[in-house]
Image: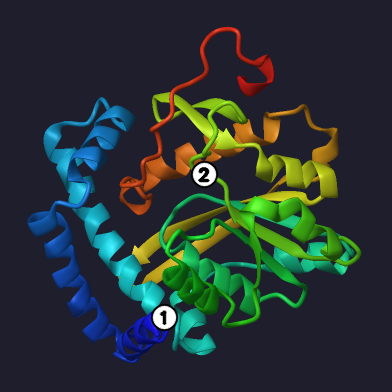
Amino acid sequence: MWYYLLFACCYLISLFPFPVLYAISDVVYVSLYFVIGYRKKLVRQHLQQAFPDYDQKALQQIEKKYYRNLADMIMETLKMMTISPASLQKRFQCDLSLLHRIAAEGKSCQIQLGHRFNWEWANLYFKLGTNVPFLVVYMPISNPHVDRLFNYIRRRFGTILIPADRVLEALHPWQSQPHITILVADQNPSNPRRCYWMPFLNRPTAFYKGPELIARRFGEIVIWGDIQKIKRGYYRATIREAFTHPQQTAEGLITQEFSRFLEAQIHQQPENWVWSHRRWKHRPPQHGADASQKL
């Protein structure tokens, strides 16, 4: 009952044209930033830590742009329920020739992204532009109704969803054919002792071992992906091959290089990364922890 009410409300909103959706987004922005102050203190702490050389005016500009982007992301995600392939491909651009070449060679690859707006549109766009199985590793949402709604949205163009809590088991049946795995690789791990710790945005940061483990175990070519916001409602993604033979790399190197790549992209367009996540709620292990957790 509650799911169908949620679905109906979101579906009706998604039918609005983009100008109306962005007018609603403006109201959402004012509510989030000025009225509710959604995690504003946390966002400020993160920005000050990441950009210690920026003055207060520059940090505030990033902060406000971030909340505008967050509001747009909310409305753009709802729009995914009814957006046409042609409309999506007009608003989101990426040269996919690298993916086509890898598939033509009979190989599989893994695209690692950060929480860069709009990663949800990227999931749909990449699926539309490729002909091999497209697997998205996702973190289940605690609210079952919202989780079900997001599953519907993400599967709309044929994406295959792989829950992160059983990823190795779920990926195994696809290894006999070329495929593409995509995952947002900057999630905050739940267990700070079962991850890699990397210097990232001026502080030790935990990264899941999973993306690297998947690439090394299944031999998926590793690709870095990034998304830039060109203007409101328009995005451009770039992809590049990072590790052709992940099994031959030293443990932790793939994760280390991804953290450096993502950090560089964040510095280029800082308002386009999710600063309101509780990304640094864990502390590094004390001395004596397993040395493989640190690089």
Look at label 1 and name its amino acid. Tyr
Q: Position of residue 183 (x, y in %)?
A: 61, 55
Residue 3's mark? 1
Name which of mark 2 and mark 1 comes first in the sequence: 1
The residue that appears at 18% across and 39% down in the rendered structure is 41
Q: Position of residue 277 (x, y in %)?
A: 36, 46
Q: Secondary structure at mark 1?
A: helix
Q: Residues within 10 Å of mark 2 (few under 14, many from 20)?
A: many
The residue that appears at 69% across and 65% down in the rendered structure is 135
Q: Which residue is at the far top?
A: 287
Apparent side of residue 180 relative to residue 198 in the rendered image (left or right): right
Apparent side of residue 210 relative to residue 147 in the rendered image (left or right): right
The residue that appears at 81% across and 62% down in the rendered structure is 102
Q: Position of residue 37 (x, y in %)?
A: 14, 51
Q: Quadrant of residue 79?
A: bottom left
Q: Are marks 2 and 1 in contact (CB under 8 Å)?
A: no
Between 286 and 53, the one lying in front of the other is 286
| Residue 240 visible to the viewer | no
Q: Quadrant of residue 101?
A: bottom right
* Quadrant holding the C terminus: top right
Q: Is residue 32 above or below residue 26?
A: above
Label 2 belongs to which residue? Answer: 186
